[in-house]
Structures are given as structure tokens and as C-alpha cells.
Image (cartoon, rainbow, N blue to C red):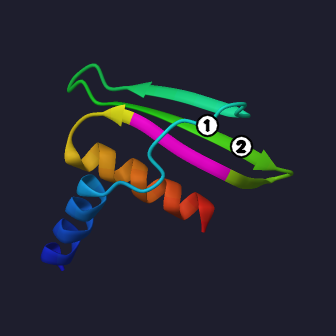
């Protein structure tokens, strides 16, 4: 189980999904962890009450960047 978890995290860190910025967003949220220096900005566009598009940008450890990548997949799926 732990091996699968590591592989998934490393895959999302090496090949992040939905990385980038979106123009004309409805929501843009910048999150910063001052203790470790991780930064993530999330951009989202809605169609009614559903997420139409979502992307993220930032820098930080593999876990923070992989988590943002996985979150965008989840929000779009």
C-alpha cells in the first residue's frame, strides 16, 4: 500500500496535471506555508455550480505539488 502511495505522489509531482494559469477566473486563491515555503495558487472557472476548469501553480515539496495536481483532477472529474 505504501509503495503505491509513493508511486502516485511521485507521478503527480513529475507530471503534474492541470498546471498553469487561467485568465478571467471566478476564483483565485493563493496559499502559502511560511514554515516550509510551499506555495500553491489555485485558479477556477465555474459553469453554474460546477467547476468548468481548474489549474494550479506554485512551488514546494513533492507532496504539496502532487496534492494540488490530484485535487484538480478530483475537482474536474
Residue stretch in magenta:
53-57
On whether residue 54 falls in the magenta region, the answer is yes
Q: Nearer the viewer, residue 18 or 51?
A: 18
Q: Residue at x 71, y 43 (%)?
A: 45
Mark closest to the chain's N terminus, 2 or 1: 1
- Marker disc for residue 60: none
Above or below, 69 against 64 in this view is: below
Q: Nearer the viewer, residue 49 or 22?
A: 22
| Image quadrant where one finds the N terminus | bottom left
- 13 left or right of 43 in image: left
Percent across and percent down for residue 36 are 20, 27
Above or below, 68 against 28 in this view is: below
Could you tell me which secondary element the residue under label 2 belongs to? strand
Percent across and percent down for residue 27 are 67, 33
Q: Which residue is mark 1?
A: 22
- 14 left or right of 16 in image: left
Amino acid at each position: 500500500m505504501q509503495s503505491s502511495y509513493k508511486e502516485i505522489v511521485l507521478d503527480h509531482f513529475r507530471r503534474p496535471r492541470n498546471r498553469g494559469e487561467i485568465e478571467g477566473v471566478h476564483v483565485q486563491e493563493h496559499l502559502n506555508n511560511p514554515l516550509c515555503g510551499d506555495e500553491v495558487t489555485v485558479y477556477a472557472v465555474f459553469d453554474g455550480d460546477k467547476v468548468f476548469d481548474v489549474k494550479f501553480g506554485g512551488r514546494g515539496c513533492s507532496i504539496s505539488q502532487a496534492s494540488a495536481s490530484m485535487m484538480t483532477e478530483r475537482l474536474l472529474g
